[in-house]
Image (cartoon, rainbow, N blue to C red):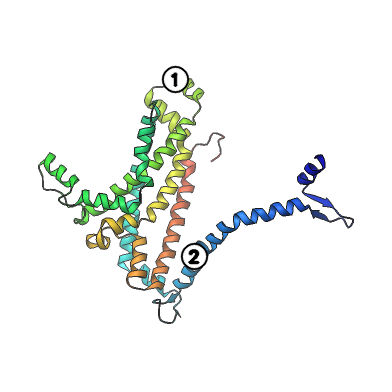
Amino acid sequence: MLDRLSTRDAPSVNTPGGLRKESAWRRKDRRWGYLFVGPQLIGMVVFVLLPFVGSLVLAFASWDGLSELTWVGFDNFVSQLQDPLLLRSIVNTLLIALITVPIGLGFSVIIAVALEKLKTRTLYLVLFFAPVVTSTVAVAMIWQQMLRADGVLSTAIATIFGVAPPDWLGDPSLALIAVCIVSIWASMGLNVIIFLAGLQNISASVIEAAKLDGAGAFTLFWRIRMPLLSPIIFFSSVIAFISSLQTFDVVFVLTANAGPDNATRTIVYHIYDLGFGRFQFGPSSAAAVILLVLTLVVTAVQFGAQKKFVHYEDGAA
């Protein structure tokens, strides 16, 4: 028994020539590792790496899916950067991110703090998390019925305030706000769960020490809980910004043809419209590369700004 254990634990053996030969058990263990990791690697290559390489190739070519592919160099990028629809898409996408991320995270923190004080919170967690596991298409269709001119929300506003019901989906000034409302509602539950876990991970001794020093509820929240929660808020903000830059399904279902006067046209919808609406796969791929660069820039700015507001317990930023 001891010999078997020693053989399993030994990573290699010495040979007369001085080379270290891997044990038979370690080789078998390595093969099993490749077997379990293999499906994930194959899926990543087929569904991530190959489409990414193909998109880069098409970004420098002209192809409609049927005719012969021809190289055009940087013409696709030049035409896209001069396209008013792409510029409108970028502005709309950044507006959605700048509206949904701060408001969504802010409400999530407040709700998490309120739920932390409850002894029984299972029902509330289920209710808040339900939109996260619900199909985005189903969520958008439900909200579409609510936001119609004769829908529940518009009728309630007209009845309470005595004004004409707003046309959330037909008014260019309200369509983007409607998309933001649905996006915040659909993603809030996940952030609530994450922030609640972060709040429960804060040491009780730190809270008790602050209370003994005379810290009130506001000071306790702003000076103690928020700094200790800042790494989690930073993580959630990065994920939320990236998700907001990829907004598509809500726009596609909620507003027809990117809303009135392209009021809700996002970059991903622009990519879809060029590729599968007009069969201009070259400009579509160029717009996808532009989205990639924009995402990298936004993420880099967030990581550069974290030193000003993210506080780690070990003092490292």
Secondary structure, mark 2, is helix
State the residue position of label 2: 52
Earlier residue among tags 2 and 1: 2
Q: Which residue occupies 26% across, 63% down?
A: 257
How far is mark 2 from mark 1, CA to CA?
53 Å
Indicate the amino acid at tag 1.
Lys
Q: Which residue occupies 32% across, 49% down?
A: 183
Q: Residue furthest right?
A: 16
Task: Determine which of the numbered discs, if any, sits on residue 211 in the image.
Answer: 1
Q: Left or right? Give the position of 138 relative to 70.
A: left
Residue 154 vertical placement versus 41 (above, below): above
Is residue 102 visible to us here? no
Q: Quadrant of residue 72?
A: bottom left
Q: Position of residue 27 (x, y in %)?
A: 73, 54
Which is more foreground, mark 2 or mark 1?
A: 2
Secondary structure, mark 1, is helix
**Disc 2 packing (10 Å; few <14; some 14–19; many ≥20):** some
Q: Nearer the viewer, residue 214 or 54?
A: 54
Q: Which residue occupies 60% across, 58% down?
A: 38
